[in-house]
Image: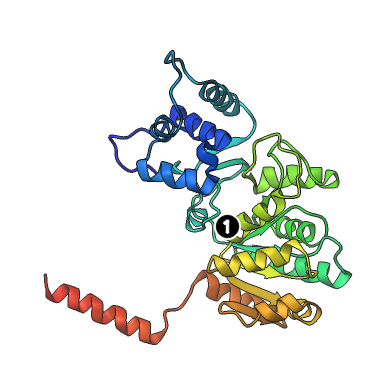
Amino acid sequence: MVDDPTLTWDDAERAALVALLRERPGRMSWAEIAAEVSASESARAVWSRLVPEDLFGTEPVAITAAIADVESWRTSDFRFSTFLDPEYPVQLREVHEMPPVLFSRGSLRVVDPAVSVVGSRKASDRGLRVASTLAGDLARRDITVVSGLAAGIDTAAHEAALDAGGRTVACIGTGITVSYPAENRALQERIARDGLVLSQFWPDAPPQRQNFPMRNAVMSGYGRATIIVEAGEHSGARIQARQAVEHGRSVILIDGVVQANAWAQEISLRPGVHVATSTRQVMDLVEEALNPSIPTEDLVTELIRDRGGRSHR
C-alpha cells in the first residue's frame, strides 16, 4: 500500500502495472515486476525505465489497452485490485507468489482469519465426511474456509462452511468470469454472494494446467494453515502442502493421507507439519496456527530486549 501522501496510486498507475505484467520487459517474472513497482511505488516510473519510449512520444499501445481494460473492469460485476491497494489481503503480501493483481466477487477483506481445506477430486465417502465436518466446525468458530472450488473435497468444504452460516473463499484457477468445473457454477455464484471468489488470472482466462499450482500457492498464502484431507501422490494438495511449508504456514495432514502417500510421510517430518487423528486435534492445531504462542525462551528474550531498550531512553 502506498503510504506517502505525495505519491498517487490511481488507475493510471494500475494500468501501467497491468501493461508491465502483460509485456514482461526483459522476460521478468510477475514477482520481479511486483518487487520493482513496490520499490519505486510507481508502475509508470518502472514502465518508463524498462520499456523504450516511442519515437514519436505517443502513448504505447500496451498502456492504452491497459487503461481501457481497467476502465471496463470498473464497470463489471467483479472487483479489480492491485497489491498496492489498501483493500489487498495482508496475508498474501507475506508470500513470494503474491499475485500483483486480484479479481474478486464477494466480500474482499484486508484481514481474514482463514484455513485451507483441500484434497482429492475423486474423494472417498469418508474423505467427504471429514471435509464437511472440519469445514463446518471452522465456520462455526468464525474461521474462513479456503478451498479451490474443485470437485470432491473442495466442494464438500465450501458447501459445509456455507451451510453452517460461515464464510468461505474460493481461489479459482481460471478468470473470474469463467465457471469451472461447469457443475459448480451454482456453487460459485453462491460463494460470490455469501463469501468470496478470488482469481489472480485475467478475467476471461480459461482453465490451463499451469494455473492450478499457482492457485494452490495463493490458497496456501491466504490461509494460516492448510488441512490436507485426502490426496494422491501427484495431487494439487501435495503441491500446496509443500508450498505451505515454504511459506511458513502450518500443515495439518489427516492420518489417512500419511498412511497412503510416501510424500506425506516425508513431509510430516518437517517443522510446522502435523499429523492429526481426530477433529479435536485438528481444531487445536488450527487454534495454535491462528493464535501462536511465544515459546518461553523467546518471551524472555523479548522482555530483556524491551527492558534494555527502555533503559537507554
Please state, as top left, top right, bottom left or bottom right, where the N terminus lies in the image. top left
299 relative position to 291: left or right:
left
* Image position, residue 72 (x, y; %): 60, 24
Evaluate whether residue 108 shows in this view: yes
Q: How many discs mark residues in the rendered view?
A: 1
Q: Nearer the viewer, residue 118 or 185?
A: 118
310 relative position to 206: left or right:
left
Evaluate whether residue 280 shows in this view: no
User: Which residue is most to the top?
Assistant: 56
Q: Residue at x 66, y 63 (%)?
A: 240
281 relative position to 97: left or right:
right
Q: Amino acid at mark 1?
A: Tyr
Quarter residue 295 falls in: bottom left
Q: Secondary structure at mark 1?
A: helix
Q: Nearer the viewer, residue 63 or 313?
A: 63
Q: Residue at x 51, y 35 (%)?
A: 20
Compared with 189, 223 (above or below) is below
Q: Nearer the viewer, residue 148 or 235?
A: 235
Quarter residue 273 falls in: bottom right
* Image position, residue 22 (x, y; %): 58, 34
Quarter residue 121 falls in: bottom right
Q: Residues within 10 Å of mark 1 (few under 14, many from 20)?
A: many
User: Which residue is most to the left?
Assistant: 313
* Image position, residue 149 (x, y; %): 75, 52
Compared with 129, 68 (above or below) is above
Circle 1 residue:
222
Q: Residue at x 80, y 43 (%)?
A: 185
